[in-house]
Amino acid sequence: MDGDYDPQREAEAAMKLAMAVDWPERQRLIRLAMAWQELARMRSSSSRLKEKAA
């Protein structure tokens, strides 16, 4: 899951975009931000588990 993106940064960017658009698009962007936040949590959990195993 390593790459050139930071899920938390992507979530924040999606929320900023959501504030700038009208309702249907805003709802979609909020869901997208929530998905990015979940990926950030999963990535963090995975990192902690790897550290404990080492």
Image (cartoon, rainbow, N blue to C red):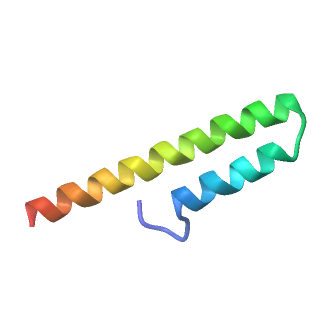
Camera-side residue: 54 or 17? 17
Camera-side residue: 28 or 12? 12
In which quadrant of the rendered image does the N terminus lie?
bottom left
Q: Position of residue 16 (x, y in %)?
A: 75, 52
Residue at 34% of width from left, 56% of height from top? Answer: 44
Q: Position of residue 30 (x, y in %)?
A: 68, 37
With 48 as the anchor, is 44 left or right in this view?
A: right
In which quadrant of the rendered image does the C terminus lie?
bottom left
Q: Position of residue 28 (x, y in %)?
A: 74, 34
With 54 as the anchor, is 11 left or right in this view?
A: right
Residue at 46% of width from left, 48% of height from top? Answer: 39
Residue at 27% of width from left, 60% of height from top? Answer: 47
Q: How many marks?
A: 0
Dividing the picture into quadrants, the one containing residue 18 is: top right
The residue most toward the bottom is: 4
With 40 as the anchor, is 9 left or right in this view?
A: right
Q: Please tell me whether residue 49 is drawn above or below residue 6 in the rendered image.
A: above
